[in-house]
Amino acid sequence: MTDAAHAGPAVARLRRRIDWLPYAIGAVTIFILVVFLLYPIVKTVMFSFVENGKELAFANLTLINFERFLDGATFTKSLWHSIVVGVLTTIVSTMLALPAAYAMARVPIPFRNFVLALSVIPIIAPPFIGAYSWIILLGRRGIITHYLDIWFGIEMPSLYGLYGIVLALSLHYFPYIFLFVQGALAASDPTIEESADVMGASRWRILRTITFPLVLPTISAGALIVLVKALGNFGVPAILGGEYYVLPTLIYYQVHGYFNLNAASAIALMNVLVTLVAILLLARVNRKRRFVTVTSIARRAKQHTGLGAQIAANAYIWILLVAALLPQFVILFTSFAERWGGTLFPTAYGFGNYITTWEETTTPIINSLILSSAATLMCVVFGTLAAYTAVRKRFKGKWALDMTIMLPFVLPGIVTGVAYLTTFNSGLIVLTGTATILILAYFVRRIAYMYRAVAAAVGQIDEKIEEASTMCGATWGRTMRKVTVPLIAPGIMAGGILVFSTLITEISVTIIIFSARWKTISIAIFEFLTSDDVLEATTIGSIAIMITLLLVFTASKLIGRNMADMFR
Amino acid sequence: MAAHVLAVKELRKVFDTDQGQVLAVDDISFELSGDELFTMLGPSGCGKTTTLRMVAGLETATAGSIFFDGEDFSGFSSFQRNIGMVFQSYALFPHMTVFENTAYGLRVRGMAAADVGGKVGRILDLLGLGDLAKRYPADLSGGQQQRVSIGRALVYDPGMLLLDEPLANLDAKLRVEMREEIRRIQKELGIMSIYVTHDQEEAMSISDRVAVFNLGRLMQAGPPHEVYANPTSLFVADFIGKANFFPARITRSDNSGAKVALASGAELALERLNAIEPEEEAQIAEGFDATVMVRPEHLGIAQAGGGGLPCRVRRIQFLGSTIRYHAECADAAGEVIVDSTRLVGGLEEGSEAVLAMAPADSILYHKGQAR
């Protein structure tokens, strides 16, 4: 204690001091969210009600952009295609994931942690380049197609269209359901099933009446994520769609073919509507109580130890993993092919592609790293503050903060792209062609990841620890710096890595608002693929996968968590 | 209906852990029959719950056997044993109502829906849960959840009832209420029951027989009053109720009793020698170290001056029906506790006093027994 404190009257030490920092930070966060998230969305909605080429004015309001969804042509079909792709992908992913999740939690699986870590790779690898590898395998002149034909005489259907899209998306997204459900099964209270067992219920009956109903909410939570992501995915239908348009590829077509932002806005709005309807439907299914039976007992639920069960479970898990990792492997393999023209397999192998594409690949890689880092930093700062505020403070309109931040989670990436293009192409703030627009778009796209990771971490910390710091006389800022942030650091770290690793190969937003100066890895790959420079595309794709994997792996080591836990 | 008989013989359980093998249950045997309420009591990690789970079929025994009505249980999975079990966490199905939870075992047994309703209704009424049938477990108090889990375990007339620390999650007052309730229902239905707890008061108050476990072994089994009055080991003497211990050296011993010398040199004549195994008997002999155990109500305390072991009164507690004297005594291992039914004149906190013990109420244990 200083002399001054002693000298002053005792009352002075109790003087009411306004702790302005939380308010200032709150204000900045709200400002950013309003300007860069709500404003673009509102403007997009308005754009969709105005005909292309007309002024944005009340007199010009029209439904003309939406009428095209009723004429039975391209727009109508795309809407229908999107719904079919979304629903089928969700069903197939769930069917693939559930047996694997059950096997993982209830059968002894060797190298359990390794299997879990591997299962994360399909989610973090960029899906559109993975989609291309299915062409190499199952396309008209693909390797598997060839052998199926000469060995068994089986003729594969054309990969382009619904079949290819659902195949690639399901193998890309099923780990979400797998990781969720196996986690829930592993953490569930074993005595619940034991009590059913003692009461005379058979294995199958327990599975049907106890285990399954209890993980159903978790299954639908995972299915919801898959459905939302499948509805918004641009890369896979762009590569494998052919003539089969879905809403995201239709938006791209309207923007890059006609620069018709009004039509694109209308499609975007439709895309969002479909997503919202899907969420509401699943929320209805999920409206029943959520049953959390998390246990503190270290004992795990009864395991199937029969030899047959063990063989079947391990075989299923590994076949599924190999199928899901095949695209990444094929990309890596192709990147080492120096000559591959007109033959089934490459005729020369080596590092040549990495050397010849060096000049073309370095710039996009550096660009992606810069843009992703900047956006991640913003997410870390504002996501952490918003999450902390939402968990700790009681204030009116908390739901609004929650909604605003989670909004981009349901907005397909390409919709955010359209919103940014319509908003910042002209008017008050002009940002098109700059790095800033990409960084801001990335930021609003990913802040929800950070928000959720940190909210979970803050929720784990007893509020009384912070109160103790306050009682010792620390201000809010000091408590944050010295107590809260160090305690939630692993959560921030996990969120940050998740944001960064998924931004490095982001394509849905980027494809709409990138500029020649700020070409990213994903754009480079996309351009190589569309001009049939497969070897270059796979080379830079391999580098991207490596960077992502390395990051996630390092982070999981730093935090001391399994890679799989970071995606749950 | 003939009375059921459960025979557990030489049961062993070895767990394979990352730190190597752990012997959780070491050669346990006991038998129970009819409507006995048998309690397994012991500190945590003593093997009581593991033994219970082996009876339930939730753990597989490493060695030994469990016979129920003459039939080997090892050939039956847990779901085929027709056992009712109450878990510490209650393990109620959170997605089912009270009615559905209770009906589960009946439906599993393929009972017709019409009969299920009546049977569930009767057991819920017996437990005073009639009005809560439509509620979900999350909407019930701890005590109500406890009742549901008991009802759920009893509704299908199981051959026996297993209770694994059923009252551990309740508050003190409710615990006393519920344990009486459990005993009432158990006797009313006449169902053989095994009860696991680490609370000795709970065990003593409700059991027909108590089995004291320690480090995977069954130390002693018998009616509560007998285990209290004649503990066969220092561990049981210490674990059940309060006990005073005086280290001693045996100076003379024969069939009728022994003479021992305490630390201060004071001599005691004892009639009760605790020796069960022959090798223990050999250690109750002249020259061996031993321990004398006396229950607090069997020690006398008086003003200094008379004969007895000198001590100093440290604290006097008025517990209502008894008065408890805490004293310091050079001859004793640790603090000495004396329970008296009346106030001893002239004794205050801090005053000098003497302790007296009767040979009939003091038990001599050989040194080899761990406390």
Image (spheres, rainbow, N blue to C red):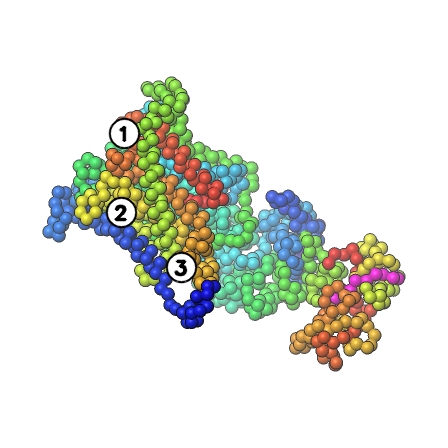
Q: Position of residue B303 (x, y in %)?
A: 78, 78
Q: Which residue is mark 2?
A: A272
Residue ID at (34%, 47%): A378
Residue B86's label in the rendered image is none
Q: Amino acid at mark 2?
A: Val
**Would you say the residues marked 3 and 1 are in contact, meaning their CB atoms lie under 8 Å apart?**
no
Q: How many numbered callouts?
A: 3
| Residue numbers of the magenta segment | B243-253
Q: Chain of mark 1?
A: A
Closer to viewer: mark 3 or mark 1 = 3
- Determine the secondary structure under disc 3: helix
Q: Which residue is mark 1?
A: A530
| First in sequence: mark 3 vs mark 1 | 3
**Would you say the residues marked 2 and 1 are in contact, meaning their CB atoms lie under 8 Å apart?**
no
Closer to viewer: mark 2 or mark 1 = 1
Give the alpha-carbon distance from disc 3 to disc 1, as whole Å.
Answer: 53 Å
Q: Is residue A89 visible?
A: no
Q: Quadrant of residue A476?
A: bottom left
- Determine the secondary structure under disc 2: helix
Give the main secondary structure of the magenta stretch.
strand
Residue B247 magenta-highlighted: yes
- B22 relative position to A95: left or right: right
Give the alpha-carbon distance from disc 2 to disc 1, as whole Å.
Answer: 27 Å
Q: Nearer the viewer, residue A220 or A183?
A: A183
Quadrant location, the C terminus of chain B = bottom right
Q: Nearer the viewer, residue A28 or A538?
A: A28
